[in-house]
Image (cartoon, rainbow, N blue to C red):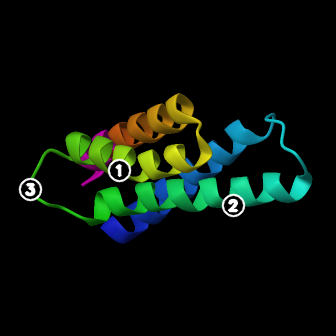
Amino acid sequence: MNRLLLGLIFGLGFGTLDVLIMIPLKYEDSRKKKEAMASAFIDRFMIGFLIPNISIGIQPAIWGAFIGLGFSVPTAIITRVYAPIIVTGTLGGLVIGILTQLFI
């Protein structure tokens, strides 16, 4: 499968999944909730998009977990919500890496 198309599919899927997870969470106001959801979507979209499109010669599952962790830690530090953000990003990156290996 084409890497660009695969990245778009994984990015849209992972971004959408993360936003769906955030729907029941409570926020101070609706503006902050929209901002948080938009930020989470972009962050997760980029994880899903980059994993199949950047190959550095290591196993895709390891690369995926590394990218997921790398993108998640800054967001977790800023929001002070560590475990859910880091775990979701790392596991999502791992799964996308495994799927990348299967489809490419």
The disc, 3 or 1, on the residue closer to the chain's N-terminal end is 3
Q: CA distance from mark 2 to mark 3?
A: 32 Å
Q: Does any portion of residue 2 appear in the rendered image?
A: no
- Seen at 42% across and 62% down, the residue is 49
Q: Nearer the viewer, mark 3 or mark 1?
A: 1
Tell me, for residue 91, which label it has, or none.
none
Residue 42, how many percent across, how many down?
57, 62
- The residue that mark 2 highlights is 38
Asked whether residue 100 is drawn in magenta, I would say: yes
Residue segment shown in magenta: 98-104
Residue 35 colored in magenta in the image: no
Mark whose residue sits in front, 1 or 2:
1
Q: Residues within 10 Å of mark 2 (few under 14, many from 20)?
A: few
Which corner quadrant of the image does residue 62 belong to?
top left
Residue 6, position as x, y percentages in the image: 40, 60
Q: To which residue does mark 3 refer?
A: 57
Q: Which residue position is annotated with label 1?
A: 70
Q: Which residue is painted at 52% across and 43% down in the image?
A: 76
Q: Is residue 66 above or below residue 35?
A: above
Position of residue 42 relative to residue 84, above or below, is: below
SS category of the residue bearing label 3: loop
